Every structure is written in C-alpha cells, then in structure tokens.
Image (tube, coloured by chain):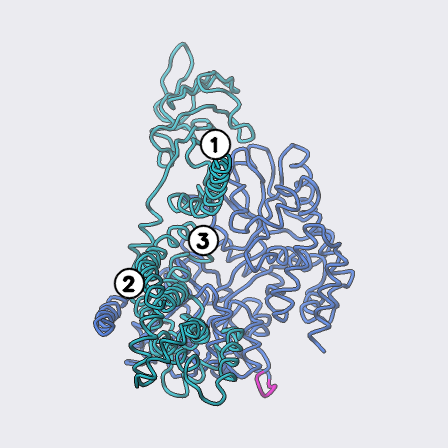
Amino acid sequence: MTKHLMLGIAALALSAGLASAQELTFKPGSEPDRFDWASYDQFAKDNDLSGKTLTITGPWTGGDKKLFESVLAYFEAATGAKVDYSGSESFEQDIVIAAKGGTPPNIAVFPQPGLASDLAKQGYLTPMPEGTGAWIKDNYAAGQSWEDLSTYAGKDGMKQTFTFPFKADLKSLVWYVPENFKEAGYKVPETMEELKALTEQIKADGGTPWCIGLGSGAATGWPATDWVEDIMLRTQSPQTYDDWVSNALKFNDPKVVDAIKDYGWFAKTPGFAEGGEQAVATTDFRDSPKGLFDFPPKCYMHKQASFIPTFFPEGTKVGSDVNFFYFPAYEGKDLGKPVLGAGTMFGITKDSKAAEAFIKFLETPIASEIWMAQSGFLTPNKNVNLAAFANDVQRNMNKILLDATTFRFDGSDQMPGEIGTDAFWKAMVAYTTGDETAQEAADAVQKRWDSIEK
Amino acid sequence: MASIAGQKSRLTWAVHISVALMVVLWLIPTVGLLVSSFRTTDQISQSGWWESAFPVEKAFRDRIPGEGETQADGAYVLSGNLLTDGQNARDLKPGAKIVAFGTSGIKPGAYKAGETAQTEAGTMTVNADGAYEVTSSTSFEGSGPRVYFVADMPPAFTLSNYRQVLFSDGMGQAFLNTLTVTIPATIIPILVAAFAAYALAWMEFPGRGLLIAAVVGLLVVPLQLALVPLLRLHQDVGIGQSFVGIWLAHTGFGLPLAIYLLRNYMVGLPRDIIESAKVDGATDFQIFMKIVLPLSFPALASFAIFQFLWVWNDLLVAKVFLPANDQTKVMTVKIADDLLGSRGGDWGILAAAAFVSIAVPLGVFFAMQKYLVRGLLAGSVKGG
C-alpha cells in the first residue's frame, strides 16, 4: 500500500517539477524605455550556473510569493540555475530552527534586521561578497543608513556586511478616501499641526477621524509601535532616534514618553478613533482600514504602511477610490521630512557560488524593475528606471522614499527581539486600553531591557 | 411504585433536555464554522454568521452616468437603473432591493425609496427596483451626480472558498503527502509500542519499574524542546529532511503515550489466562500474538485514532522535518503558507479548509469506532 503511494507521489513530484519552470513575465528586450535589459544580458554573460540549485526561504506567501518567483524566473533564465523558493507564515521561527538544526536554505529573506543580526552573531550567516557594503552606500538613497542596517557583528565580533537590503516598505503613510474628503470639504494636511487641526475638525463635524487597529494575533500591538516611531522621528533628531533604538536613550526618557502620549492623543482622545480605545486595541489591523469604505464613513483616515491595499475591499482602486498622503512633520520643528520604512534583507545562510551570484543579481537594475513593473515593490536603489513602475501611485510612494531627508528603519524591528517583538507591543496595548499610563508602559519596557542586558 | 415510575419519567425528561442543550451548545461553534465556510471574507467581516440567513442592508456609492440626457419641461433629465447598470451591479445579487438613497456619504439613506430629493439644481428620485430619474435646470455636460443608496441584500452563499481549497495547484499532491506521512506514522508507533507494552506489563526483568517511570517521565517532555537536537541527529546520520525522518520523529513523539496507554491496558488483562497459557507451555511471543494482542484491540484502536488525528493535524513537526519545497508540502503547511495569501489576507478560506481536512479523520474515526465497540465486547466475553 505504502509502496504504491510512494510510487504515485514520486510520479506526481516529477510532473510537478516539470510544470514549475516559469514563463518570463516581460520578454527580454521588450519596452526598453522601462527596463534595463543591458544589465540582464551582462549578468547572463558573466554567470553560468547550469545544473546548480539555489534554495531560498522567506516570509512572502500568496501573491507576494508569485511576484518574487517572477523575478526568480529571470535569474534562472540568465544563469541556468534552478531556484526553489518557499515562503512561510512563521518564517521567523522556521529559519532559526533550520539554521540551528543544520538544514538552512542557501539564502534567507529576513523581514527584520534584528533577527538577521542575531543569526550573524551566532555564526549562521556568511558575510556578503566583497564590496557589497560600499555598493549599498553608493547606490541607495540614504545609503549610509541602509549600509548600517546590513552591518552586524559576526561570531568573532568583527563588524561586516551580512545582508543585502532589497524591497522596501514605506510606513509614514496616511490613507484616505478622496471622495469623502471632497464631500466634507477637507484638505490634505501638509503639516502635523494641520493634521491635528483636521482631526479636531472632523470630530467637531460629527465624524470619526481615525481608524486604528492594533490586533494581529500574537503580534498584537505592532501598529502602535509604528505610530510611536513615526512621532519620535517628527519630534526628536535622527540621532536621538538611533539612541532610542540602541537604548543609549532610556525607553522611559521623557522624550519617548511624550511621543507615546502624542500617539495617545490620536488613539485615546474620545471620539478621535473609531470604536474608542478598547476597539482600537482589539480590532485586527487587516480589518481596520475597511471603515474608510463604509457609508457613512466610519472614519476618514488610516495610518498604515504601503502594503495595506491588499486588505482593502475587493475591487478598490488605489489612486481613485482611495489615496494616501505623507504622515506630515511638525512645521514648528526643524527636522525636515523624515521617513519611516521597513524592508527585507537577504542573507546567505549556506554559502555557494549560486548564492553569491544571486546577491549580485539583486544589485542589477533589472531585478528591481521586474517587480516594480508588477506591484507592491519600492526600492531606494537610485539606478533603477522609475518609468518601470506599473502606475503613478507606486511611483509617488517611491518618490517619498527617494526624497526623504532622513530615512529610518522601523525601530522595533531593530531592537532586541524580546523588546521589539514583545515588550514594546504589550506596553502599547496596555497603554491604549488604559491599563497603564504612558510613563508606566515605558517604565515596563525599560525594566525588561535592563533585565536582558545583564 | 407508580409514583416512583412517574418521578423517574420526569427525571428522564430533565436529563434528555439538558443533554439536548449540551449538544446544541457543543455544536454551535462547528455550525458557525460551517456557515462561515460558505461566506466570502468581506461578508464574514461585515456580519456574524448567525445573521447570514437574513437579508442585510448595505450602503453603496455610485455615479450616475452623464451621457444620454434628455430634455423635458425645460429641465434636463437623466434616467436609468442603479441595480442593473450601475457600478455596483457585480456586487448586487439578483433580488436586491433599494430601501433608501441619499446625495451625501454622511447620510447615504436620507430619503426612502420612491421619494423625491431636492438637489442644488433639481430633483432626484430612486425607486426600489433601482430605476432613477435625475433632473436639473442646467445641462449635466456629461457628468452625472453622485448617488448613495442603501440596498436590502438577500442572503448570499458561495462555494468559492471550497473551490479555492480543493482545486488550487498542488492540493492533490499535498493530500497524498499528508497520507504518506500519516499512515506510517500511525502504524510504526503502534507496532513498537505493543511489543514494549507487553514486555513492561507481563515480562519479569530487573529495572522494569524504572523503565516504566522513565516512559511516564517522557510524557511531560514538550516535543518543541527536541526539534533542533533531533533535526541535527537526522542530519548527522544522513536521513536529513525526508519522509523517513518525519516518520521517525512522529514515532518518537508518539511512543511514550502509546506505551503508557497500552501497558496500562495490558496489565489489567486477567492474570489467569496468561498464566494458564504459560503453564501450557506457550512462549512470551505466542502469548503476545495469540492472547494479549487480540484482547488489546480496543486500546490499540483508540491509540490509533489519537495518533492519526495528531499527525494529520500537525503543522510544526512537518515544517521542521520535511524539506521546504512544493513537492513535500503536507496539507496543513499548504493551507497555512500557500492558500492564506500574503500576510494572511485570504483568511476567509480557513473555515472551508477546516472542513476539508476534517473529512478524512472523521471517516477514520467512524470506521475505527466500529472496531472499538466490537473489540470492547469481544474482550468482555472472552476475558471473563
């Protein structure tokens, strides 16, 4: 019985293997005003990896997985190598088990630099090929901050470039429905002062200004950390922000507590957030933006990263049905236009010739352009052709990224895991529901931080 | 006697009613899940499953097309149908009725269907069947006004969740993989555990008590602790991530409970039978095969059900011990990582996925249940 089953499976596996060779989404050579095919041809000429296999694991599943595989298809076509990508919803846990258990993939795609830095310290990451760090610095907008993000201490304590950042997410965005704004006569605010005035005005007009949802299963609370980070960047200097992330500035410093209170102004002032503070803490972040699309609108604004359109009701068109504006900076504080973002970092967990070639492939403009031309891809890479973007919405988002006077990576992702993916989240939930004051919540996080540093 | 009989019958009723209530309470989550599996993600997030059988009111926004205006009584008129030709025609199921309409998003239902609303430059009327007429003293010049309406939506159910779960690429492969993992991972531990349990129950040897204590001790070791060391061991001996690896892993994780359960059952078999067999000259192996094993059928069957369900539903062990590629994905991994969409956006299919993956364990349970009852009866008669 089992033998027959195994035979059947072997046959199926064979046929599945044959079917997986993917077609190229854009024909090489087509639309030369959008794609840099020269970089593709050059890469194909320099790299021949026929017969080699490259395994990659990452956090992208579903639609994102298909998009990434469409990029991989070009790497396969150019080099002759076979790439096996598998995405996992619990990537953060899986990669640690795989690395420690001795079964790592060639390349891992880290959604958080904190995790990559942990693995680098334990010696599970291979440093990037020579010169990658310098390349990032020279070719990425705000290159120094991207290079810093990719540089960690290895097992021997030496600081080296261990990851390659590819694909960015933009966090400092506020989503709104232009039609609702037009009907009510509201204008897109240019400064934080205007945004606060607008918030008060909407409430005075009888509406609810914000939809905020912190729910995310075991990760409940993370959307609030984005709020606090964005506000930190708008009230304190980038240096202070970096100090906060590294805990050189204590978490319960008045500067941080003020930022938390500022978030509280939006989320906890009665009438400002849909459903009140209890609903804010429990509403799932995926369901939260749906209030924008109700009639009468349950809320007028929703602050969330560039990925959120996935969760808008089916058929919603970004650009016309819904749009975004930059979460503005205080006019009264001379801090420029800071931008908060996130991104995925590619690290080599099992070295091979193909793995190093793949990192080189990610440096080519074409690797970014293929994804840009589809959807959901932003990049700080200055060499790519912005004409490749599928629509103006994404081009505008990318411009926010390229124009940023200050770019800072999601702070909670860089803090030690115990803080950034646990204590900080829980503190924000406790503060939002009113169980703790801003000071108490910040004290609790600092206490936890002190306990792990001993 | 009569009064006692009467009391008894009243008591029976009370028992029946409370049992019925318990069953209903117990079934509510399952029924909810079943109903949800026939609804789309948007529907699930809009209203509870218990409301799904009733029509719901939903507000829509539309823009009346500006082309084709006619002139009557000195006014410009636009007319048409919102339900059949509007922008929302795709979402509006047949049978939808307009109950109210309005001209602003803040009050989408300011006017009842059939009423006439005064607008800045004219009037607007929308009927329950979707027919509308908008008048204006000036030309619309190709752009019609915004209109909001509240429609009564008839209950709607869909099979799309099931279609997505059953017919998505690689689901058949994942089903076969799950069977490939589950069947050996159920049979191997039973085989090993039956021998071990017999030895621990009926064979005298030094250190037996300690061994039993060790098995009980192993019951409380969480398997998560063993994942990484076990994977390393597999890697070192050359099994790596493979089906053999996961069979061994499940066998290991299942054995303590299996041995403990079977040993306790076997120890309770009548000593007389086994001793008389020994007197007649039977070897341990013969006693095991001819007497103990047939008598232990109920315990074997119940453990088989446990182990089968546990392996069938397992996600963690499969993720760790099978290689991460499409050819070896089991159903749970397939559902969690491939079907749920990016960041879990397609969570609406979870309910359908639950019912699809319940099907086989249910079948196994009912099939085994029969043996379980027969085994119990057989045991009681022969054992006595």
Say which of B58 and B246 sits in front: B246
Q: Tell me, yes or no, whether dots 2 and 3 are on the same chain.
A: no
Q: Which residue is mark 2?
A: A27
Vertical comparison of A55 with B80: above or below: below
Real-space CA distance between mark 1 and mark 3, rounded to the nearest whole angstrom: 24 Å
> Which dot, 1 or 2, sits closer to the camera?
1
Q: Earlier in the sequence, mark 1 or mark 3?
A: 1
**Between residues B188 and B321, which one lies in front from this camera angle?**
B188
State which region is magenta. Answer: A154-158
Chain A shade in the render: blue
Tell me the crowding category of disc 1: few under 14, some 14 to 19, or many 20 or more residues within 10 angstroms, Cα based.
many
Q: With respect to residue B167, does B381 lie above or below? A: below
Q: Amino acid at mark 3?
A: Gly
- Judging from the image, what secondary structure is the residue with disc 1 in? strand
Camera-side residue of A383 and B280: B280
Asked where in the image residue A196 lies, by quadrant, the reply is top right
Instruction: Return the mark for residue A239.
Output: none
Which colour is chain B painted? cyan
**Which residue is drawn at the image coordinates 41% and 56% (left, top)?**
B341
Q: Which residue is mark 1?
A: B59
